[in-house]
Amino acid sequence: MFYKLKEKSYMNRKETYIMIIISKKDALTSADRYNAVCDFIVSHTYPSQNTMLGDSWRIFNYYNELGSGGHEGYLTWTTGAIPETDIQSFYDALIHTLQEIGAIRLAELEKTYGLLLWQKYHALEKGEIEEDEFYNIVRLADKAYLDYEDTFIKQMWAYAEELFPKLFTVID
């Protein structure tokens, strides 16, 4: 793959970012395009300069981590990936992106449980609370997520299709 700089609009803002050149044979199916987008996005560290990369990085990692480890796994991952001083803006941006792709129920879920779980997780790590206090909330949040997961999967695939032409240029 080759990289070049492009300028495009994203959520009514002009931004310069890397556009990847991909061969047509590597982008034939929606699964090919989804995997290309996902691989590119999650290969970055927490981006703060580019809105599109930041938004997509947060939501793809949210999707991947919740799908594999629930809210506890997601919190373990965010603890290593997000500076603690930036957690409020991180959750605000995640909630905004969830709303943008139509995942309103998940945005509400994160408004209700996101920062609370973050605080309880860190309190548990410091020995300030009992495990049950944390895990009771995790169970509620995970159940709410699992009730919506099938819809969210479809929204993520649609989001990847929307991102693909903004990130990739297909050549023969």
Image (cartoon, grey):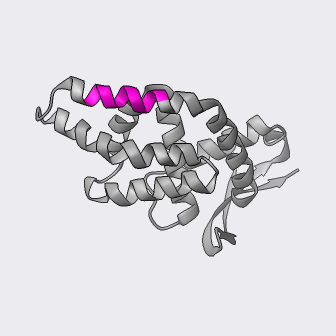
Q: Quadrant of residue 157?
A: top right
Residue positioned 61% across, 72% down in the render: 16
Relative to 138, is 106 above or below?
Answer: below
Is 89 situated left or right of 17 in this image? left
Q: Which residues are magenta?
A: 134-143
Residue 128 in magenta stretch: no
The mark tally for this picture is 0
Relative to 41, is 72 above or below?
Answer: above
* Spot occupied by residue 43 in the image (x, y as percentages of width and height): 52, 45
**Magenta part mainly helix, strand or loop?**
helix
Towards the viewer: 36 or 105: 105
Residue positioned 44% across, 63% down in the render: 48
Relative to 26, is 56 above or below?
Answer: below
Residue positioned 29% across, 26% down in the render: 135
Is 23 situated left or right of 77 in this image? right
Furthest residue toward right: 172
* Spot occupied by residue 166 in the image (x, y as percentages of width and height): 71, 60
* Spot occupied by residue 27 in the image (x, y as percentages of width and height): 80, 43
Is 19 situated left or right of 128 in this image? right
One can see residue 90 in this view: yes
Furthest residue toward bottom: 14
Is 156 situated left or right of 90 in this image? right
Towards the viewer: 19 or 150: 150
